[in-house]
Each structure stands twice: as C-alpha cells, then as structure tokens.
Image: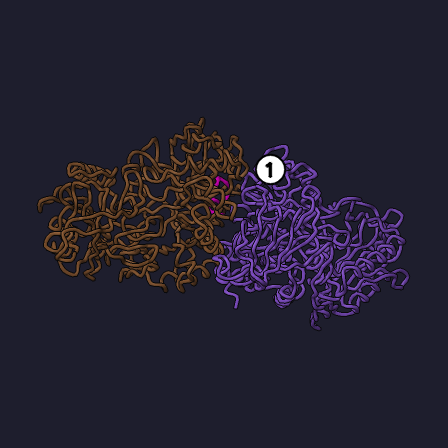
Chain colours: A purple, B brown
Amino acid sequence: MVMYVRILGSEKVCNRVDLIDVALGAKPADVVIQSGSLVNVHTSEIYNADIAIKGGRIVAVGDVAYTVGNKTKIINAEGKYLIPGLIDAHLHFYHSYIGLTEFAKAILLHGTTTYADGFYGPAVVSGRKAIEFLRQELLKTPLKCIFLVPVLGYSQCREYSLSPTPTGLTAEEMVDMTRWDDCLGLEEPSPLPVIEKEHAHVKAYESILRSGKVITGHAIDLWSGYSITAGRQLTAYLVMGSLTDHECVSVEEAVEKARLGMRILARMGPGWAENIPELVKAITKRHIDPRCFAFCTDALPPDALAAGVAMDECIRVAIREGIEPIQAVQMATLNVAELFRVDEEIGSITPGRIADILFITDLQKFKISMVMANGEIVVNDGKFVVKMDKPKYPEWMYKTVQLKRPVKPEDFEIKAPKEKKEVLVRVMYYPTNSIIITEKRMVLSVKDGYVKPNIEEDVIKVAMVDRFGRGNVGNAFIQGLGLRKGAFGTTVNATQQNIIVAGTNSYDMAFVVNKLAEIGGGMLVAADGKELAVLELPLFGLLSDQSLEIFVHKNRRLFQELLKLGWKRPSTNALDWLGPASGTTRFRISDLGLLDTESRRIVDVVLQ
Amino acid sequence: MVMYVRILGSEKVCNRVDLIDVALGAKPADVVIQSGSLVNVHTSEIYNADIAIKGGRIVAVGDVAYTVGNKTKIINAEGKYLIPGLIDAHLHFYHSYIGLTEFAKAILLHGTTTYADGFYGPAVVSGRKAIEFLRQELLKTPLKCIFLVPVLGYSQCREYSLSPTPTGLTAEEMVDMTRWDDCLGLEEPSPLPVIEKEHAHVKAYESILRSGKVITGHAIDLWSGYSITAGRQLTAYLVMGSLTDHECVSVEEAVEKARLGMRILARMGPGWAENIPELVKAITKRHIDPRCFAFCTDALPPDALAAGVAMDECIRVAIREGIEPIQAVQMATLNVAELFRVDEEIGSITPGRIADILFITDLQKFKISMVMANGEIVVNDGKFVVKMDKPKYPEWMYKTVQLKRPVKPEDFEIKAPKEKKEVLVRVMYYPTNSIIITEKRMVLSVKDGYVKPNIEEDVIKVAMVDRFGRGNVGNAFIQGLGLRKGAFGTTVNATQQNIIVAGTNSYDMAFVVNKLAEIGGGMLVAADGKELAVLELPLFGLLSDQSLEIFVHKNRRLFQELLKLGWKRPSTNALDWLGPASGTTRFRISDLGLLDTESRRIVDVVLQ
C-alpha cells in the first residue's frame, strides 16, 4: 500500500522504505542507467553518473555498480544527457479538447512527466464528480499531476454578478479540496474576488496557507505599468499570498513582479501567448536571478501538440534566446518542483525522487530520444511505447449540454425602437492578431424593429446561450471574425462553458445551437440551415472522446469550412475567449447580454 | 483572531485580509520606511524602495507614498541597506545554557528574527510539557521559530540499546506533533534508526512527507569520502526524504551532498565548528549553484553570543571568503525560507511577508544598526529596546535532577581481578583541539581490586550517572581533560541529559554529583570535598534562569577554577560531548558503562 500521495499519480511508485535495502546494497535495483551525462539541476553541473532505480524511484546516483543484480535491467545512455522529467507549472489539459488519457500520451511524448492542473473546465460543467473522474483517469496513465483546487470551477466570474453553473463546484467543495493530501494549492484565483474578500475565496486562501500549500496567481494586466490602480490591486492580490504569475507579457512586468516576490511562470502558449522570448530578457538583459523563473504552457492547442510542441519547446526557445541550457532545464524542472514544494518527490535526478528521466541527444537543440516516467520507458525514439486502455467514459459525461427549450431565431434578435431606421450600437471589436477585444461604436440599420448586422463591414451577431437548462440568451454584435455567411458555434468558453455562437443570421445561429445541444457539445459550422462541418466534443461538451489525430483532422476540416465562409481568425477556437473572464478585454458576451467588466454590469447594446 | 500560524510567533502579526485596504490605498499604513536601499533577495538586485507596513506585515514596496496617513510612523533609512531578518536554519537554543527569553534577546541583537528549533534538550528531560512551555515562552518575545519535531527527544540513542529517559517524548507524541499546523518538519533525526526502519521514525517520516513538511538531516560523517558503507548509508538516509545537512566539514563532502539533492546548511558554530570558510569554496572554487546553500549556527556558546557572534557572523565570514554580499544575504534569508517552505511568510521584503527588516550601515562589513521584527523596532544602535517580562518558570522545571539515592565514592570504582597489580584498559582519548574521541589502550595500576587513574599521564575517571531516578552509573577512563585534582561535573549532555562527571578521585566525583542533584543541575567543580565553583542550570538541569551576562560571568569563574586544577580544554562544556550521540566518536560514556557505537554494545573497560 502506498503510504502517502502528494503528487497525483505517484501511487504508481514504491514506498521510500522499500528503497533502503537497495541503497545499502542488500537488494538489487530494478533498472540501472549507465554511462549517461547527468545534468544536475541542484548544482548546475554536468558530469557522468549512473542511476539505480527501484519500484519507480531513484535509489542511487553515481557509482551504482553495487546495486546491479542478475535481474537488473541495464539501459545504456552513452552519448545521452540525462535530465529530470519536465514539469509544466500551469496547463489546462481541457484546452487541448481531447480526453485526459490521450492528452497524457501527447505531452509525455514531449517529455512532460508531471503537470499542474485542477481540471477547472470540466469542474465548471460537472463539479466535483468531473474532478474525481479525471483524477481516476489520470491514474491509469504514466502522467502525474500537481493537483490544484480549480478555483474557477467555483468562482465562474461571480464578481460580475453572473450566475454560476448549477452543477459547478460549491464553496464548501472548494474549501474541502484544499485539505486533500494530494492537493498542492490553488489554481489561479481571479484577483477581483480575492481583493474584495469574497468569503469562500478568503476561506480557501487561509486553508491553503495554513497547510503550506501554494497559491498560483493569475495577475493578468495587474501591475503598475498598466495603471496606478492595477499596481495597487496587484499589491492587494500579493498580500493575500498569491505566489506565482503566468500572465506576464513584458520584461518590465516580469521584473516588477519578480521583485515583489512572485515566481514568474514564463509562458509558451504555442500560437497564442509565446511570452518566453520577451520574458527571458529579464535574465539575459536585466540580470535578474533565474531562480525567479519557471516555464509553463497554459494551453496547448491540438495543432501545436500534434506538430510537436509542448514544454520541450519552452526549453528550446529559452536556449535560442540566450539562456544557458542548464538554467533552461532548471526552469522546467527543479524550479517548478520547488515552487510547488514537491522537490523531495520530483524535479531532480537524486536519491528518493521519482524516476522521471529524459534522455537527450543534443542539449543545445534539446532533442528527446527517450522518456522514462515512474521508472518505466514510456517514449522511445519519438514513439509512445506503453499500452493504455481506452477509457470508458460514463453516460453522464455525454449529457451536459441542456437547453431549457430548443432556441428559435427570434432568440437572437436585438430590438431597437420601431421608429428608428438606424441606431448607434456597441460592437465588440476583435482585432486581427490579438485576443484583446475592445469596444467600437457603430451605426447599424434597423429592420422590423430588429438591429441588423452589417456583413460588408464584418459586423455580425454573437450570442451566449445558457446550456444548463436555464434558458438565458445574451446577444451582441462583433467585428473581426470575418464570417460572411452562416453561423459558427462552440460549447467551450473558459469560465462559464456555455454555448457561444456567432453568425450572419438568426436562423443559422439557432440551427447551430440546437444541433450542438443534440450532439452533446462541440464546434459546428452551418449555413443556409445546413451543417457544413462538425467537431464533436461530447465529454462535458468540452472534450473529444477520439484520438488527437482524429481531432486535428476534423478540426482542419472545420477550419476549411470556416475559411470558405470568410473566417479571418487563425484558428477555430476564436469564440472560446469571448465569454466572461478576468483580463484585459473589457466587453464580453454573457448569457445575460453584453458585459462591461469595468462597471461589472450588463450594458445596452443599442445606445440610441 | 489569527487565522493560521505556521511559524511559531507569527501570532503577533495581523491577518493577510487586514492588509488589503492598505494595499488599495483605502487605509493608511502603520509604518513607512523611507529612502533605504532595498536588497532584493528574489532578483539579486539593490535599489531604492520604500516599504509600507501594517499590523506587522509588509503591505507594499516601492512607491508607497499613497499609504502614508496622519498617524503613519515614518522611519528614515537614508544611507541604510534594508535586508530581510536573518533566519537560522538550525540552532538549539538550549546549547546556550540560558532561558529562551534571554536567548531571544541575544540573537535578535544579531539580526536573527526567526530560527529553527525543536527544543530537543528540554524534551529529553521533560517531554511534551517542556515543549509546550517553551512554545508559550517564545510567544512573549519578538523572536519567531520554525518549530520542528525534536526527534532526539524521542530517539535518545535507542539505536545503541540505551534506555531513553522515562520523561522524554513518546513515539505517539512525536508522530502527533508532525500534524501540528505550526510544526514545519523533523529536526535532525539520527541516520541509524531511519536506515534501520525503526517503526516510530518511519511513521514520523511518512507523516511529515504526507503533509509536505521538511526533514532536516544530520548526516554526520555520512558520505562516500568517509567509507563505502557511509556512502551507502547516506543514500539510504536520502531515499527516505532527508533534505538538508548541517554537518558537512569539507568542500568535497558538501559538493557530493549538494549533488545528491541536499541543501547544505553551512555551519558557523563559533569556536567549535566554523565550517563556512571551507564550505563556501563549493561556490567560489567549484562553482556549485549557491541556491544549494544556507547558513546555520547549530549551537551558540554564551561567550560567543555575548561577544557578538550569531547569524550575522555567517554573512561576514562568507563575504570575507569571497561570496557576493547579496548571495550571502540570500543564504541567511530566502534560501532558508524556501527550504522550510515558508517563503510566503518570511525571507524577503515583499508584500504579505512579516516585517522582519534589518537596517545595515555597511553591506560589505555587515554592520547592523537597527532590527525590526514583526513590524516593531526591537534593536536600535546595538541595544535591545523592547521590554520583555522576566518569565515565571514553574516549579516542575526546577526539579529534574533526581538520583535514585545519593551516590557514594564506591559507585565510581572500576573493579579489576584482585590478584592483578596492573591491567590493560580502554581509555577514551580526547585530543587537544578536537571533539572527536578515540580509543587508547593503556596499562593502569590496581589497588585493593580497583583500577586507579594515572594523573601523571592525564588519565582520570569519567562517569555518567542517571538522573531520572533509576540509579545507573557507568564508569570509564579518559585522557585529555587535564584535571590534576578534584572533579568536575555537568547535567548537560546532548542526547541523554544525564550527569557526566570526570575526576581524579571517587570522593570528589560523588560530592559533585550529589551537589548537582541538590541544586537541580548545572556545572560544578570541587576538590578535597569542597565546592570551588558552581554554575547553576536549574531549568531542566540545562538552563540558567539568570541573564546571559550573569551566566558568562559565572562561567568564567568556573573556568578559572578548572584551569587552576589543570583543565586543558578550551571551555567549560567539554564534558557535554562525551555522552551517546551519533557521529564520529566511537567510544562514549553512558550510564550503563563504556559504549562502543560501532558494535553498539557496552564494552569492558578492563581488557586483561
């Protein structure tokens, strides 16, 4: 029986007491890795050392010949650098739209043997039940997880007076999780409820602080370079004990936050937030102590994952930008383990730690030839070599998209005074090559008392539809998507996981929404009342139950169909970021209407 | 009400939520420190920054003018460097022989605002009751404590089959303490019981590991440079999760242990273990990453304390040996806070941390002009400026030296076959300028069936007398103390806290022991049946209830009297280290007789 578990998935390795006899030479090791060059992340040295492994943990490092017995498996690592398994400091698996088993395989291929996640997306949809299922699913893979309380599963932008999902986490469940042995902290609480002393947030903070666990931050736009108020809000967020930030975008921001005691999780969100080149200037140009830095990816779009980008890319980019390879490796291993206070378990190749070891052929180019997780080879020569059972997903995970009633085209109409021919409206303006949406005021024409989109100017309709059986539909206009025909909808959107649909006309919008409900969630594009492409995400309405390859294939088809309709965004997930969330974007679409995150009120789309 | 306490003594500062209004500018700060040069231990920079403080915690750093209100106290720090309060990573207050209140004052004078201790000496004598009293006593001082389970209070060299004190910690009490919120780890468990899987040690380790707390190590002589066995034992000790070592004496040892994932607590035990000059070569000459290093003092003899040596001296010595001042400061602050996983509470001058701040006039020479602890100035211009009540020590702390019956001279005789005129005996050999005792075999004469000391050759008698009412007396011979007359005894001795007495004759030895019992413990020197000097240590038989100054004065007198009798050791505490403990010294005096720590048996003093 395993005596304790702090890192989810470490159930797979043996107890520490079982290592003692091997360490003393009284019993043989299971595996010995010979002749490799050890990258020592503690001392910042590289030297030759052999490694003895027993029951998935490292027993001895250095001269370990005495641990070799008749049945000890020998692995020759000549010409290879040996580095600890990578630890992604902040990553939501659900943003890759695939099941956790499939996701585990995808990131293990890139050397990530442990990652930090709280499963907040599924928690928004199905609460604690989702979390418990995913925790069990993870145990059947070789991946490990630094499990954090998914605060967003509870908060769901309550600070904007929006209704949280009826099936999300309760305050009690959130606080209860802080006490689990294998919960290691809080996952990016939004600053506002913390600064405003929202009761459940304060309780969760105090419970976490009491047990010496870690509060990871989400300090988007929160620093004095942004505004005086933002600087003070950052300070208020910090005094509560928030210890990390993965939202820095400029070197100045990173330097300020590091000076204030935050660990900077430099992000390499492939294609959407590639912050590392800028942020490592703090080290290369500003000479900030590199111990303040660690790496994360935050969200790994399936295309990038399939194309071979994950935590390993963080190291490659950092080296390319002038960081010493050992330092880059530290930022992806020991620095992360230390900040989560699990460095006795993972993060270095030293006695007692879990045997997560990467075999690297070229340290400068960071080419991974083999991945060992929990003492077992899981990746060899770019191939995943472990058989994992296809998970059996239960029925309840498939039935999460519930409309109160099928929507009708009228649900997507915005009324204007009948006598008016045109009105001034607020339009969400989504500039090309940015995820930051601003407000534009434009004049739109009115017909039969309804405000009409202006397709010539790329002003179309956008709506959020409640999918938890409550019937709300919030409508607005948006510029920047490019659709010239039809409608496109998704059941995935950060903090609320409702349906977002954008379209040139109400008929196709209603069609898309009703169809998405019918299939239990996904992304769907339609025109003239006809489905053009669909990407099923039947698990929680968020995840595919197919392979990464199938997802990528279907996603490309969907993207092709979108392009045909005029789509201007670089990928299919552009709608995901229109819903309520904390961050720069002031205007967002909610199921109650257009949300102004500054005044925290639903504001009129039609101004006059 | 304080919402949580991890660091003992942090009850004094406010809750984090109370800081939010100040951070946001809605309420004023209590104190603002202006115009100082901040030494930022996170980023390794020095720059000008002001500091706002509220309720004993730091609220804001940088431009904090907005927090100044009418009643805000302004402290001008122009020309001063501001560094975090020092944290001693390993220090037993009881080795300074003074009460905790007096000790707090002494180390605060040297900038130590937090130190790690488990109160193991008092715990050996009076168990949990002692610990609880001391924890309460500490709360009445401005000092804070990283409280660790005093494993030695339970183990007491059980591995040598010696009887633990009847009043020490039980296994259940030890394991129970691991679960306290304000217990942050285990204090230096001896390697042998760990490696041998002693049940209570394994339970304590697992409970600590489960809760993410820290196991500080005590890996004395445990490394491959000492012997192959020692190297393997170190590995076995490491696989169990032991994370630090304060017992390194050579740079090679430190490098090996750092490579194996231990944090090296470089020790500056003034006058007895000044390891820093050697160990920092790992950084200056071997270029090991300085993050592996932190400082500690372990034991601060009162003379050194009174002469002005504590953690501050660690920094001075390190700088003198070529370490950059900022790095040296990191090793005494942030590195310690991080290793104990309390860096959200102490170790840097950043929002939310407790306001422990030193004002330094010269960073290179490290001269402290002012000490702030918990937001209050406690030391100004070398003077302690806070009034602390003299503690009321309860009766039970004074009555801990209990003989089963008064000892008689015969109790200190070692028998030899009557027909023999001389015998070969084992003699404990205590070389000058070393604390390592080896064995010497010598011929001694026999009279009336008793082996006689050889005062000419400096071979005198030594004994350990049980002081827990059980009546054991163990006898041996020792060379190297220098006494030519009389006897000297003490009730202080590391892991067992019995009475150790050394003398040229049994009469004086008996006199000393009986007298020590009468006064409730201390150090006492006598000759010809007459007391020559006494230093009372009435609390637990370990501590003075007087001031440091009185202790030092009396100790000097005692030392003078010892010198007159021929004493060759550099201080009065030479007997303290003769009793059972883990470490190099193979032969030790126990209450059952001469102990061979290698065979773990009581061995014959008389060989033939």
Q: Is A438 left, or right, of A286 in this rendering?
A: right
Q: Name the foreground residue: B497 vs B538.
A: B497
* Residue B397 visible to the viewer: no
Q: Quadrant of the N terminus of chain B?
A: bottom left
- Residue A237, x across and y down, in percent: 56, 47
Magenta span covers which residues? Answer: B344-353
Magenta highlight on residue B345 = yes
Q: Secondary structure at mark 1?
A: helix
Q: Where residue A400 sits: x, y (%)?
A: 71, 68
Between B589 and B601, the one lying in front of the other is B601
The residue positioned 19% from the left and 41% from the top of the image is B457
Residue A543 among magenta residues: no
Tell me if residue B306 comes above or below residue A72 in the rendering.
Answer: above
Q: Residue at x 48, y 53 (%)?
A: B235
Chain of the residue displaying label 1: A
Quadrant location of the C terminus of chain B in the rendered image: bottom left
Viewer can see residue A505: yes
Residue A202 against residue B109 in the figure, above or below: below
